[in-house]
Amino acid sequence: MRLIRAMALGLLGLAGLAACRAQAVPTPSRWSQPAADLSTQIADILGPGQAQVTIRNLSTIPPSEIPSVRKLIEQDLKAHGVLASGAESANSIRITLSENARERIWVAEVVEGSETHVAMVHVDVSMASVSTADARMVLRSERIAGLSIRIGGLVRNDPILAAAEINGHFLVIYPDRISIFSSAAGVWTEANTIMMERQLSRDPRTVLAANADGGLFTAYMPGTQCIGNYSLPMAGPSADSGWSVRCHASDDPWPVYQSGDASSATPLKAFYNSARDFFTGIVTPGIGVDLPPFYMAVMIPRAAGGAALLISSIDGNVQLIENGAMRSVAGTRDWGSDFAVVRSGCGAGTQIIASSSGEAENDSLRAFEIPALEALPASGPLTLDGTVTALWTAQDGKSAFAVVRSATAEYEVDRVTALCN
């Protein structure tokens, strides 16, 4: 009897031990493989020893998952004989989790004394796409239908330089004209056209601004400025006869708006180099900092009050000008030259929507927040059916307009909005 009881207790003990072991086996994480691969490369560089480990997250991986990523990396390093130590260690491992619209990369800078080596792994897109579901916002695009001209039944695919919805109409600037569209059954059709004396280049930068009541707009183009007025039509004429547009040669500076608000009492303006299609770096009023030539500039409102100026330099750097100093913004290496500020109400409330770098048949947009000197992704990438040639904040400040050129050279305008997660 005692033997049977002992055998039963032994079996129970084995079962319990097996259960404990089963519970001790961790569930595989989607970050396990890249953590293991990166740790192996680091160990091959550093060898057994100690090192200070720091992790910087510039990806859409939620902050709540970073401790798990750190734990995986430190466990894998330990298995290779590399122990995470305090700041007193002479060796350091600086890991950056980054991504753009095309790829996800984890980079480790391994510092041994005066020598620095780099290890890098590409993270499976399917892994990172899971994390984008946890982003604080999702971008959506909607094509503005009908902003093209039909001649003889064929669509005339002229480059669209800028557009704005003003006073119930849609104004579109092409290289040779300004067209005014009216809406019918949800589709915009051209009603009025104002031809310009000289044709602009294919994709120059252009600013189209309206005052608060929509009764006046100003179009800033290379070497040209057009002013439009709208007055209620008299009885009898068509509904579009209230528009009057006058254009003249001008080298006046162009406005830089604060989050789509054109009503600022003293808006910042920048001088444009018409021959080179970029801003010279000279602004008015002065801001106490000498700016380099740049393609794009926006004002970012700060939670504590005031605003910071964000520019896209012609050398590809993104700079933040704040408190009398100009500093580079990390996490913007894969930005294109176009971006816009939107007041979405998601996350911090205001985000920067940036295009991806390079010419691509399927370009993308992504929302970022810049609380300090790093651009932190706030959304996953929004893939578009073409290349972004222009991007700016809509008049309401809550959305953005993007001009997209398809592989067949067709141009369209998309309204980009954000949905909060």
Image: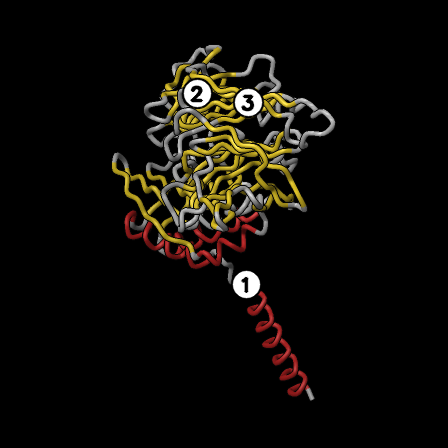
* SS for callout 1: loop
First of labels 3, 1 by sequence position: 1
Q: In this orientation, does residue 98 appear?
A: no
Crowd rating for badge 2 (residues with CA inside 10 Å; few <14, some 14–19, many 20+): some
The kind of residue on which mark 2 rests is: Thr
Q: Quadrant of residue 288?
A: top left
Q: Is residue 388 visible?
A: yes
Q: Amino acid at mark 1?
A: Thr
Snapshot colouring? secondary structure
Give how far across and how far down residue 189 sits, in percent.
59, 41
Q: Amino acid at mark 3?
A: Val
**Residue matched to label 1:** 27
N-term-proximal mark, 2 vs 3: 2
Q: SS at mark 3?
A: strand
The residue carrying pointer 3 sits among few (fewer than 14), some (14 to 19) or many (20 or more) residues within 10 Å by Cα, namely some
The numbered disc on residue 224 is 2
Vertical arrangement, residue 203 with respect to residue 412, above or below: above
The reply to whether callout 3 and callout 1 are in contact (CB within 8 Å) is: no
Of residues 54 and 368, the one drawn nearer to the viewer in this rendering: 368
State the image quarter where residue 24 is shown.
bottom right
Q: Quadrant of the N terminus?
A: bottom right
Image position of 46 (left or right of 415): left
The residue at the far front in this view is: 236
Residue lying at 41% horizontally and 15% vertically, measured from the top left: 251
Q: Nearer the viewer, mark 3 or mark 1?
A: 3
From the top left corner, tell me how far across and down residue 74 is, in percent: 44, 50
Q: Nearer the viewer, residue 135 or 196?
A: 196
Residue at the spot x=54%, y=55% of the render? 130
Q: Secondary structure at mark 2?
A: strand
Mark pair 3, 1: CA separation: 67 Å
- Left or right of 180: which side holds 91? left
